[in-house]
Each structure stands twice: as structure tokens, then as C-alpha cells.
Image: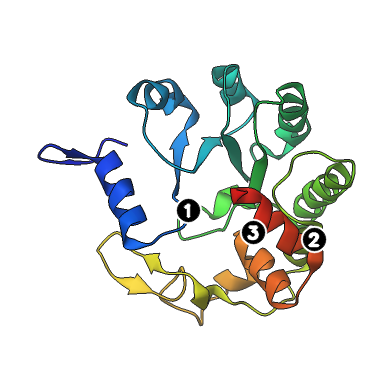
Amino acid sequence: MQWNDGKHTVNNLFRLAKQKGFYSISTMISAADYTTWQQRKIEVDVLWVSIMGINDCTLLENLQGASLYMVVNNKNCQEVPAVLAFLQQHPAVRQIAFNFHTPFDGTEHLALSKEQREEVITQLITHKRKGYRIMNSVSGLKNMLTLHFKRHCWICNFIYCDGRCSPQCIDNLHSDICEQCGFSMAGEMNAVFNCKPDTIFTGLGIRL
């Protein structure tokens, strides 16, 4: 949001992407930046607002036309029901997407235990089936519950901070990080490749 190159701002970047042929432009900001975002009138098709838990939701009482994003870890996993309740009380929020903490080096202490992961994902599947506006599909969530699925991460471009491009989110595929993956899109992509109808319709709903 703060990027600029001379007189060019991030709006120019997004417009250029559209001119290049990108169908949909999305980006993510923190809950604390939402008011500034509104004031700057930055143009995207899909806006995600990242929250850490229910306290961040108090900053978003006036959120409209945007979606929420939450990474669940062992510090905030008990707040998931409260966040879902906030979602239902604010129909102007489009939806919420959940990831689960991936224990990269130095962050292992935030990882969910097997029991915590199972509890959270079971809650999400239950609420999804009740009609809660959860972006994750049931098929994708089931994948993330077991992590026993083929990865198709190569269909994305991962750009590292040093500018390198990679077909996966880590350099060392021989590490065990993939066995502890928290990126729900991995589960969703597998479900798409297996032609799961609920995942396909969920994906279409992000942009339509």
C-alpha cells in the first residue's frame, strides 16, 4: 500500500496488471491499515484484511465489501468461534479464509498440536456446512486435516524476498515442512485437480 516509484503509486501497479491481462487483482492488508486503505481508495477486485484474532475484529466494525483472513496458531486457536460469530454479525464482510501456522525456522513454537488442528478444522467444516461464509471448501479442509494429499504448488509463482522465483514456498523440498503445511491453498488446489465440485464452486465465488 505504501509502494511508490516517483509519482506512481500502487494503484498504477494494479492498473498495469489489468492492462497486461490479469483477470482479477487481489491484495492483503492488516486490520490496522483498513481505514487508511479506504481513504486512499486503492483499486483492487478482492481485498483481504488480515486478522490475528477477535481483538482485530473490533477495528473492522465498518468493513464492507472485503474479506477476512486468519492464520490459526496455538495462541489464537481458541478465538476461532468468536471470529466466526463476528462474521455472522456483519453481513457486509464477504467471507473469511483460514490458514494454519506452518512452522518455518524460528516459529515452531506457534504450531498447532495435532489435537488443536483437528479441533479447529472440525469446527470450520461444521460451520461451513451450516452456511457460514468460510472461503475454504470442505474438501480442501479435509485435505488439511490429514495432509495426505499430492501437492500441486507448482501452479503458483513464489517470489522470495531476494527476488528469486520458485515453484514452491521453500528451497529445501527434502525438509519435513511440507508434512506440516498450513497453507490451505495446497489442500484446495489438490481438491480442484481431483474435480471436487464444492471446491470449484467455492473458488468461482471468490471473484464473481
The coloring applied to the image is rainbow
Disc ID at residue 198: 2
Q: In the drawing, does residue 171 fall left or right of residue 188?
A: left
Q: Is residue 127 visible?
A: yes
Image quadrant assignment for residue 9 = top left
Residue 23 versus residue 170: which sits nearer the camera?
23
Kind of element beneath mark 1 = loop
Tell me which amino acid carries mark 3: Ser
C-alpha separation, residue under disc 1 versus residue under disc 2: 21 Å
Q: Measure how far apart labels 1 and 3 are at the Cα level.
A: 20 Å
Q: Which residue is mark 1?
A: 24
- Tell me: residue 107, above or below residue 31: below
Which residue in the rendered view is the most extreme toward the bottom?
Answer: 174
Q: Position of residue 83 (x, y in %)?
A: 71, 30
Identity, as a three-letter code, of the amino acid under mark 1:
Ser
Measured from the top left, where is residue 22 in percent x and y? Answer: 41, 59
